[in-house]
Amino acid sequence: MEPHAILAAGIRVLGLLFLYHGLLAVPRLVTASMKLATKFQFEPLFTSFLACAWPLLLAVWFLRGAPGLMGFVDKREK
């Protein structure tokens, strides 16, 4: 296996870890949305959304192969 393929596989594994971390926050987001529906509390919904959204966004970027990172590390990537 060449170094480029090993790096690409490592980046995708990192994407899976971020996906797992983001999906762990989904039950907390559902609970916070129920609090919004019953008690009109926006702060738990906002913090839960942030805890869920940023790992999922990074997971999508890493699972797509992190084009900006791969282009910086390996000059063969266009």
Image: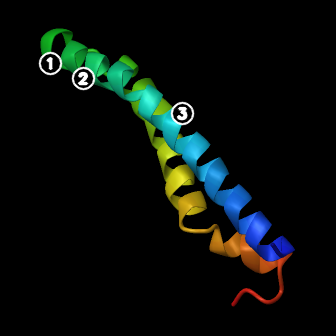
Query: Is mark 1 in CB contact (under 8 Å) with mark 2?
Result: yes
Q: Which mark is residue 33?
A: 2
> Sequence order check: which comes first, mark 3 or mark 1?
3
The residue mark sitting in front, 3 or 1, is 3
Q: Residue at x 42, y 26 (%)?
A: 48
The answer to whether 35 appears left or right of 20 in the picture is: left
> Sequence order check: which comes first, mark 2 or mark 3?
3
Q: Is residue 8 visible?
A: yes
Residue beneath disc 1: 37
SS class, disc 2: helix
Q: Is residue 50 visible?
A: no
Among the 4 quarters of the image, the one containing residue 49: top left
Q: Residue at x 79, y 89 (%)?
A: 76
Q: Distance between the Cα atoms at labels 1 and 2?
A: 6 Å
Q: Residue at x 14, y 11 (%)?
A: 38
Residue beneath disc 3: 21
SS class, disc 1: helix
Amino acid type shown at disc 1? Ala
Identify the image quadrant of the C terminus: bottom right
User: Label 2 neighbourhood size at 10 Å, few (<14), some (14-19), many (20+)?
Assistant: many
